Image (cartoon, rainbow, N blue to C red):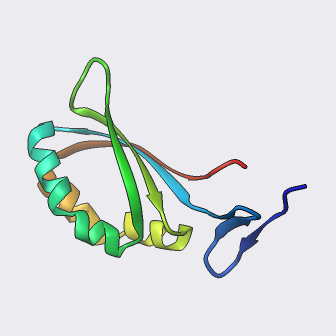
Amino acid sequence: MQSSFVNDRQKAVVTEKGVIMIHILVRHKVNDYASWKVAFDNHAGFRRSGGEKSHRIFHSGSDPNDLTMLMEWDNLPNAEKFFSSPELKSAMQKAGVAEMLSIQFLNEAV
């Protein structure tokens, strides 16, 4: 039987297999993918310092500027802090994010 609990300090799910990272699913439209990608890559250090562990970027099948990102974060408080930061809002505007469609904070199902 697998046991799990939520560590209140970090809000990370802990199981017999260890800590399950928080995932964030972000969908937004950008003005120009190539320009956005340069800005996104240049922002990597800020994301890592905020708790990002990994990310994957997907394009819509019909629109290369319609992006979905699946990001792995170290814990929920760090993810919430990062995604509500004025620095991120400014960086997104400079990178050419045209429309924020959705953001979801997800726990991995075990």
Q: Is residue 40 visible?
A: yes
The quarter of the image holding the N terminus is bottom right
Residue furthest to the right: 1
For image coordinates 50% across by 68% down, the residue present is 74
In depth, the one of 68 and 94 nearer the eye is 68
Q: Is residue 87 above or below residue 42?
A: below
Spot occupied by residue 51 in the image (x, y as percentages of width and height)? 41, 70
Q: Is residue 93 visible?
A: no
Spot occupied by residue 31 in the image (x, y as percentages of width and height)? 14, 38
**5 to the left or right of 67:** right
**88 to the left or right of 55:** left
Spot occupied by residue 10 in the image (x, y as percentages of width and height)? 61, 77
Q: Is residue 58 above or below residue 70?
A: above
For image coordinates 37% across by 51% down, the residue present is 55
> In which quadrant of the rendered view does residue 22 lie?
bottom right
Report the number of discs: 0
Spot occupied by residue 8 in the image (x, y as percentages of width and height)? 70, 78
Residue furthest to the left: 35
Residue furthest to the bottom: 9
> In which quadrant of the rendered view does residue 18 lie?
bottom right
For image coordinates 14% across by 52% down, the residue present is 95
> In which quadrant of the rendered view does residue 9 lie?
bottom right
Residue furthest to the front: 17
